[in-house]
Image (spheres, helix red, strand yellow):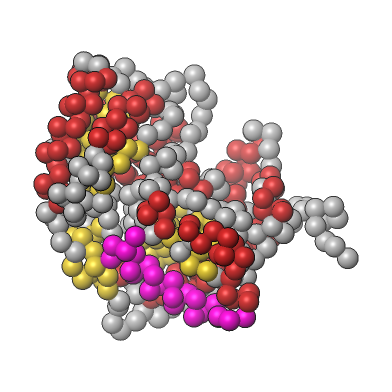
Amino acid sequence: EHVHLHNLAMGAFHRDYAFGAYVKPTRYVAEPATFMGIVRPDGRVATRNYIGILSTVNCSATVARGIADHFTRERLAEFPHVDGVVALTHGSGCGMDTHGEGMAVLRRTLGGYAKHANFAGVLMIGLGCEANQISALLGAEKLEEGPLLQTFSIQDTGGTAKTIRHGIGLVEAMLPHANAVTRQPVPASNIVVGLQCGGSDGYSGITANPALGAAVDLLVRHGGSAILSETPEIYGAEHLLTRRAVARDVGEKLVARIKWWEDYTAREKGEMNNNPSPGNKAGGLTTILEKSLGAVAKGGTTNLVAVYEYAEAVTAKGFVYMDTPGYDPVSATGQVAGGANMIVFTTGRGSAYGCAPAPSLKLSTNTPLWVKQEEDIDLNCGEIADGTASIDATGERLFELMLATASGAKSKSEQHGYGQSEFVPWYLGAVM
């Protein structure tokens, strides 16, 4: 009998969190893999080499894009080691509580991008009168201005055209420095990958997500880090993660974020089972429990060593969790702000997502999607369902692809120019 939305429902159920029950020693490899990375003067390692233009408020978004648009491929031809000049703009920054949670999250996000190793230099542009003042942002995030972190406002500069010209001049001064880099062998421990799934289907939990989990296990064994996120999409399966928590307080922090989400959705007259989306349902997923079991598989099997709030700097090595919404651009934005220098994104329905400044790899869960949308997909995990590949073998292929991408090989989304519009900080709180 057909089992789907018409005859299957989700009810309340008890979770046995069993904190730490599945913790086991991590088997690190004797000779870690390497990739060709860019080592910054302070020791941070980059997988890409961009100049970024950040807007503190929506009011400065147009001038930020105007500056970035000036630097076409033709104009950047004499700087072959620079991956691009990108404008990362957003829709908030004013009309909000200057001391509220929403402002703290926005500043943490912008600060994380300003500090990101994949940016050789950053311009930060405001209007001048917004709630998210540049001086307050710099203070909150312990940022110091210098030749490679410049800030200014439209009101001080004297208008739109003058601001764009001023910004172009500052970027032109940064370009020779940004171009003066060389890639060199560095350990795979410098890879921090954000794990994403979007447009999931009934195959996600049995092909691409477990294959990504196998690659994550390999990355952790080589000393690297992986960030699982999308709290509404692990709902109902969080007890599988608390069992892997290295300490009780790590597991309890994850449970606390689940409770926060239950309260948050209740206040907004919603529920945690508002997922799966219509596309997920058409692909065979019925309740959030099915989706969550598949989503957790992306995190592999190693210990959960830390839990972070949205856009917090990820400092731990190994498998970690970051609390984010399930909406992919918002979630990945938090991961990159936390230090992810690569995103791996599984999809069963199709995706055209990309992310700057971190390269994004997309995996198809089924072969028909690969055939239909190969121009956007980097690896077909549908071979697992076809019976022509195993989860472990596909995970090894993905790990090698991650190393190659970290070394500079362009992902499909990079080839198409994705990445600027996908910067979407999590907006929390009332719009005033």
Residue lying at 62% horizontally and 80% vertically, measured from the top left: 387
Q: Is residue 142 visible?
A: no
Q: Quadrant of residue 16?
A: bottom right
Q: Which residues are magenta?
A: 387-410
Residue lying at 40% horizontally and 81% vertically, measured from the top left: 27
Q: Position of residue 332 (x, y in %)?
A: 45, 49
Tell me if residue 105 comes above or below residue 368 in the rendering.
above
Residue extending furthest front?
74
Residue extending furthest bottom?
30
Q: Quadrant of residue 60?
A: top left
Q: Position of residue 78 (x, y in %)?
A: 14, 49
Give the side of residue 10 with respect to residue 193, left or right: right
What count of labels does the image hold?
A: 0
Q: Quadrant of residue 412?
A: bottom left
Q: Position of residue 85 (x, y in %)?
A: 26, 42
Give the side of residue 232 with respect to residue 171, left or right: right
**Magenta stretch: residue 133 in it?**
no
Q: Residue 272 or 47: which is nearer the viewer?
A: 47
Q: Position of residue 84 (x, y in %)?
A: 26, 47
